[in-house]
Amino acid sequence: MSADGPIGLLGAMEPEVRGLVDAMDVAASGRGAGFDYWQGTLAGQPCVVARCGMGKVSAAAGVQRLIDQFSISRLVVCGLAGGLNPSLDIGDVVVGDRFVQYDLDASPIYPRFEAPGLGISLFEADRSLIEHAAAAAAAIAEAPRVQRGLIVTGDQFVKDGKRDELLRDFPDALCVEMEGGAIAQVCHLNDLPFVIVRVISDRADGAAPSDFKRFVNEVAPAYTVGIVSGLLRRLD
C-alpha cells in the first residue's frame, strides 16, 4: 500500500465496472488471469478500476493484485447483494461496516466463522470511507434508502431456504454477497483502508435469480457510477 497511490475500484462483474470505465479518463488498460483493469482518472482522482470475477478466491486475488501491481492507497467496492433484513427493498443501499464469511468453519480448531490464525471473525471497514460512501449514496438521483451494518459473505448465490439459516446465525445481517468478507480479510492483512457498498438487487429468495439478472444489467451501472463518483469527490 502507498499513501500516495491511486484509489482501487473493484467489481466482480462487467456491469459493476462498465459505467466506471465509461466515465473514466483511461490512460492504460490490461488483463490477465481473470483480472481486467483500467488505469486513469475518475472524478478528479487517480484510480484503477478492476474486474476480478465472482467469488471469494477471485475477489481476494483481485485485491492483492491491485495492492502489489498498483500500490493502491484505498479500496472502494460497489456492487450488488441479496437483501436479508426485511426492511430492505430492491434498490436500497447497504454500506458495510462489518464483514463475516458465513461459510468459514475451521472448528473445533478455531471458533466457527473465525479466520484461522487471525483471531478475527468480523472485519471492519474504514470509518471515514463509510461516512463518505453513505453520503454519496444518499445523494444520487435515485435517492435510495441507505443503511449501514453487517454484510455476510459466502461462495454461493443465496436464493432459497439458506436465507433463513443465515438470519438465524446473523440476525443483524443486512445483506449477503460473494466477495466482501474475503476482500475485507485481504485489506486487513495489508493494512489497507476500504469500504464496500452493496445495492440490493434481490431478496435472496426464490425470485432472486430473475430479479438479479434484470437488476445487474438495467440498473447496476448507473448506481455504481453515481455512488463511486460521489464518494471520490468527497475524498481529500
Image (cartoon, rainbow, N blue to C red):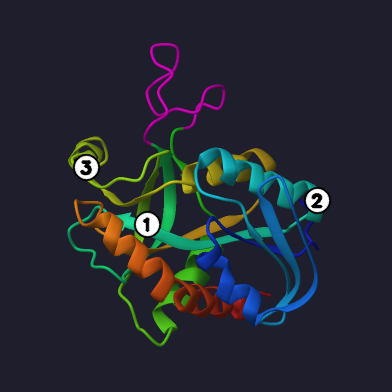
Q: What mark, if any, has residue 69 been given in the picture?
A: 2
Q: CA distance from mark 2 to mark 1?
A: 28 Å
Three-letter code, disc 2: Gln
Q: What mark, if any, has residue 73 been given in the picture?
A: none
Q: Looking at the rendering, in which quadrant would you find the C terminus? A: bottom right
The residue that label 1 is drawn on is 81
Secondary structure beneath label 3: helix
Whole-percent x, y for residue 178 in the image: 44, 46
Three-letter code, disc 1: Ala
* Quadrant in the picture for residue 233: bottom right
- Do the residues under discs 2 and 1 have CB atoms within 8 angstroms? no
Q: Residues within 10 Å of mark 1 (few under 14, many from 20)?
A: many
Start and end of the magenta stretch? Answer: 102-120
Q: For the point 50% across and 28% down, which residue is it?
A: 115
Horizontal side of residue 209 vs 75, given as left or right? left
Q: Residues within 10 Å of mark 3 (few under 14, many from 20)?
A: some
Three-letter code, disc 3: Leu
Q: Is residue 119 magenta?
A: yes
Whole-percent x, y for residue 94 in the image: 37, 63
Q: For the point 45% across and 75% down, which residue is it?
A: 223
Q: For the point 51% across and 48% down, which residue is it?
A: 54
Secondary structure beneath label 2: helix
* Quadrant in the picture for residue 91: bottom left
The residue that label 3 is drawn on is 167
- Do the residues under discs 3 and 1 have CB atoms within 8 angstroms? no
Secondary structure beneath label 1: strand
Q: CA distance from mark 3 to mark 2?
A: 38 Å
Q: Mark 3 vs mark 1: which is more N-terminal?
A: 1
Horizontal side of residue 1 vs 132, given as left or right? right
Q: For the point 52% across and 40% down, which residue is it?
A: 56
* Quadrant in the picture for residue 2: bottom right
Horizontal side of residue 123 vs 86, given as left or right? right
